[in-house]
Image (cartoon, helix red, strand yellow):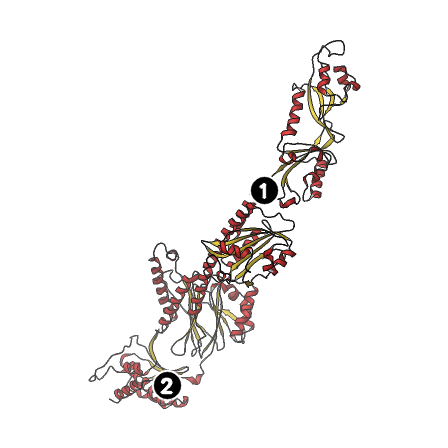
Amino acid sequence: MTRSGVLMCVDEHGHVVEWTRLAEDLLHKSPGDALGRAVGTLLSDSSGPGQNGGLRSAPWPSVRIRPKLCDGHTTFEVLTGDDDTPSQADYAVLRAAFAQQTVGLHVLDDQLRVVTVSTGTSTMRETPVEHVIGRRFVDVLDLEHPEAEEATAREVLHTGVPVTNRLIRGGAAEGGRTRRVYSVTTMRLENDGGEILGLLASVVDVTERERTRRGVDILGAVRERVGRRLDVIAVCGEFVDAVAPTFTGIVVVEVVDAVVRGEDPPLAPVDPDVPLRRAAFRGVVSAHPVGDIRHLPYGTPFTRVLADLRPRLVPVDETSPWLAADPHRAEAIRLSAVHSLLVVPLELRGEVFGVVSFYRHEGEDPFAEDDIALATDICAHTVLCIDNARRYARERAIAATVQRRSLPQRPANLSTVEISPLFLTGPEGGGAWYDAIPLPSARTALIVGDVAGHGIAATTAMGQLRTALYSLAALDLGADELMARLNDTVVRLAAERAWLPVGDPLQHEPLTARCVIAIYDPVGLTCTIARAGLPEPLLVDPHGSSRVLATPEAPLLAGSDDAPFATATVPLPDGSVLAMETSSLADHILAPAGLLRGVLERGAGRDLRELCDVMTYALQAGNSHDEALLLLARTKRIPPHSVHERDLPADTEAAPMARATVRDQMERWRVDDETAYTTELLASELVGNAVRYGEPPLSMRLILDRVLTCEVTDAAMSAPHVRHARTVDETGRGLFIVTSLAQNWGTRYHEDGKTVWAELPAGPGGANRSDPAPLKRVRDLWAG
């Protein structure tokens, strides 16, 4: 049986460098005869059997070959064994592997020096092997961080745990070329006895693959992160965050200033006088602050791009002639060590939105031609997002203008209620509104409403509902009746939306609204409240204690066309503050420890406008960004001497008694004779009408406030109406006289009957209008 073991060691050139005793026995050659000779000639000399130094008559043993590191060089051991593969084939395989392999194979010794290297890679074809053998592995590749890679290799040598597909970057390439990226796999080499021989490192140049993947990643990041917010400046900020520093370290976005305001962008070529706003910046040193509006200097790559909409790849050095046209930018470029510039237009359908400047500075590769395509793609997506934001900004500006002009331009001048609104607009605009509408008998309707949705659709719907409420309030309806009629209006408007063309997006957007109506009576110091969808009001008394006013809640307006609306009547002490808000402020107002509730309690006696300012500051500290509306109303009572009530009999004595009462009260109030006479006439007609058509009990009330009001109450529910009596008619002139003399008149129904009221201006000569003819005609009728 043939013994197994090492026969010899052969170097890369096929010369014997080690000759064992086993080889002597098999080939009958001494070490002196074999060492240094080519293994091929050595075997040819022993090619036949014989007794004069030939091979033994015993059959040749099978051999196998394996590489071995020896004194910093690669050798190949020839071993005997049971492997039937011919030794020359093994040797040929090894030589072919190192000569033809496209993966860079590096055999390293325990000092990380290159022992042998494959020559099949493009890099090694340009590098003589003798310039590589014996050098440190990290120096051969010229790595960006050689210390870190050497530490990694030593860790593999120490632990035996391989590191696979580790991406490393080469150092700065000469001549402005792109630095290389390598995928390195490192594993430890050991012999059969476990002795550590060195490392085998495979190196693959993946520069192009990584550039392609990085481009895909950058484009994906831009598509995912840019356009989340509908604001031009915010979109530009999202863009620079997405591309820096993965694509480049310095990015400047300059947008046509008109675009930021929502206006249409100019067509190319852009006039040099068109101002651009620096919308976003990422980098080292900025030539101008973000937000700066300026004209781009003529004769630079930026103005050229805005003229022909073609990207520019510009190398930058101190001799670049265009730098003289923009000294501030030139200084920033010098301080940032910029060496490469890529300028790309932000254009869509020939309209110019701005320009993006990509800079690469010290430590970064210069831009290449394929970077132009990537930059153009990411800018194309960004300009679509900017255009969406611009269109939204225009719509938001229109909606904000309509909303602002639809709201009361100044608080109503009310004698019994002091109001102050706190209105915080949201990023998209909405349909929130408030109103303070004077009602007969010195009462005031306080209203807060909110139409669901955003933008111009919600704003126009809000204007329609506010107009409807003004018309309904003139009918002197109760809070529940007002809410029911308002709900009917919303239902009709919602039905109109359903009949819009199918392509109109508003057709699929339901119309709903929320509202709270509080009618304050300064004589009885009560407040009647109806609400649908909005939170309960908060009452803060003059001493600073607060409580939520429990009121029944109805469904959203337009939720049903027959929804019931209930009311609650609560006492409202003189000097109390009533707070009515939209849902966005409910937590701050209604919670016992709410942010704004505490402000109201501590500032119970402060001016309402000051309180609104304090609450605005508090909400900003709490980062409240949604549209919010809060209406504060401080109540006042009418002085007792400004109100006079009297019960009247239900017979013919009622009218003379009413006239006498009016004469006496007018004297106490020092009302001029003309107004006193007219009020006496009105009272007589109202009382006479109640005696003739009403039911007892009867009563009359006079109120002197911003107007002079005369009320007559009876228990009948019949509705009075004006008749146009003929000259020969004995009756039918009463309400016609009232209509002719009164500034306003109407009927208010309640559980116990009705109240017919008439109003006159409270100033001197209040009964006289610009045309005195009505009064003269009424006097003639009265005298007749």
Identify which residue is drawn at 67% across, 21% down.
88
Determine the CA span between mark 1 and mark 2.
Answer: 89 Å
First in sequence, mark 1 or 2: give its number.
Answer: 1
Decide: marks 1, 2 in contact (CB < 8 A)? no
Identify the residue at horizontal 63%, vertical 42% (top origin): 180
Residue 555 shows up from this direction:
no
State which quadrant residue 640 falls in: bottom left
For this rendering, which residue is in front, 638 or 272?
272
Between residue 184 and residue 734, name the one nearer to us: 184
Could you say which is closer to the camera, residue 374 or residue 663?
Answer: 374
Left or right for 717, reference 594: left
Q: What residue would you read off at disc 2?
A: 766
Q: In this view, does 338 lie to the left or right of 666?
A: right
Residue 379, image x, y percentages: 51, 52
| Image height of 179 relative to 524, above or below | above
Q: Where is residue 44 in the image (x, y as percent from the top left)?
A: 71, 15
> Could you tell me which quadrant the C terminus lies in?
bottom left
Where's residue 323, x and y in %?
60, 57
Q: Which three-letter amino acid code belongs to the residue tagged 1?
A: Glu
The structure residue drawn at horizontal position 21% and vertical position 82%, both measured from the top left corner, is: 726
Across and down, in percent, residue 728 comes to 19, 84
Q: Badge 1 is on which residue?
A: 210
Q: What element carries label 1?
A: helix
Q: Tag 2, which secondary structure? A: loop
Mark 2: which amino acid? Gly
